Every structure is written in C-alpha cells, then in structure tokens.
Amino acid sequence: MTVYADYSFYTDEYLAGRSAAVTAADFQYYARQASAVIAQYTHGNIKADDIPDEVKMCCCELVETMHAADTSEAAQKPGVSSESVQGWSQSYESTEARKTALRGLQRDCIYRWLSNTGLLYSGVRVC
C-alpha cells in the first residue's frame, strides 16, 4: 500500500513552521490509515509515482484528525461525552456516534483538499 505523505513533508510543508501534533513515531501508523481512507474515496485515481501535493496535504490533515480522535477518546471515560461537577451529571455518547463524527471529519477533509483535482471521479474515463 502506498502511503501518501511522509514525516518530512508533514513537518516541512504541511505544518509550515507550526509545532507537530503527531510524533515521528506515531506518524507512520496514522499516515497508513489516512492513505487507506483517501484510497477509498479516490477509486485508484492516484498513481504511486506521481502523488499530487493536495493528496499529501489531505493525508497530513487526516493524520492529525485521526490522532486527535484517538487521543481525546483515550482521555475520556468510555462512553462519557461530558460531565458537570456542581449538579453532577454525565452525558453518554456511543462509540458509533464518535465513529460517525470522525467519518464526517474525514469526508470534509477529503472534499476540501481533493474536490477540484478530478481524483474523486468514480466513472469511466474515455481513452
């Protein structure tokens, strides 16, 4: 499987001077996951030897989104979406609701970066 972005592109191009939210050790795992999501939406339209910068940028944003989702999920109690201290109340969110929200963020990211590239086209191309 082709991974669409590497850590050096992430730190040098995507972040453009900002501090990294994902460590080098974690980046490869999340980049592989992000590339799989992009591949689902692009239907094999990305050639491994010619990866556009839009795809790399999309991959980096997805890496940060997926990492943030995993990090926030690990910090919360399972199923608790919010708590109130004074009147002590808890709101519960299902795992499925969190997955649905993440899929929505992924879709938004993919369309933001790739909608004008032609890579999302799933029809037949005339030779």
Image (cartoon, grey):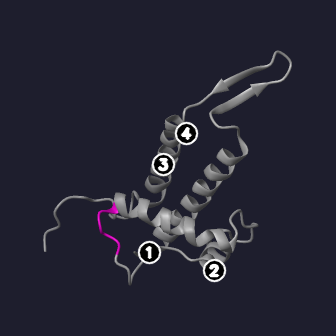
Measured from the top left, where is residue 126 in percent x and y? 13, 69
Residue occupied by mark 3 = 108
Indicate the amino acid at tag 1. Answer: Pro
Q: What is the total number of numbered labels drawn onto the structure image?
A: 4
Residues drawn in magenta = 42-46
Front disc: 4 or 2: 4
Which marked residue is nearer to the observer: mark 1 or mark 4? 4
Q: CA distance from mark 1 to mark 4?
A: 30 Å
Q: Which residue is mark 2?
A: 8
Q: Which mark is residue 98?
A: 4
Quarter of the image that includes the C terminus: bottom left
Using the image, determine if residue 86 lies above or below residue 106.
Answer: above
Residue 69 — which label? none
Q: Which residue is mark 1?
A: 52
Q: Earlier in the sequence, mark 1 or mark 4?
A: 1
Is 71 left or right of 36, judged from the image as shown?
right
Residue 25 shown left or right of residue 53 in the figure:
right
Mark 1: few/some/many CA within 10 Å (<14, 14-19, 20+): some
| 106 up-or-down from 127: above or below | above
Which residue is found at the position 71% from the left and 29% from the top?
A: 82
Q: Residue at x 57, y 60 (%)?
A: 61
Q: Are marks 3 and 1 in contact (CB under 8 Å)?
A: no
Alpha carbon of mark 2 to alpha carbon of mark 1: how far?
16 Å
Residue 101 as seen in the image, left or right of residue 115:
right
Determine the residue located farthest toward the top in the rendered image. 87
**Which amino acid, by three-letter code, is at mark 2?**
Ser
Which of pointers 2 and 1 lies earlier in the amino acid sequence? 2
Is the Cβ of the residue at disc 3 closer than 8 Å to that at disc 2?
Answer: no
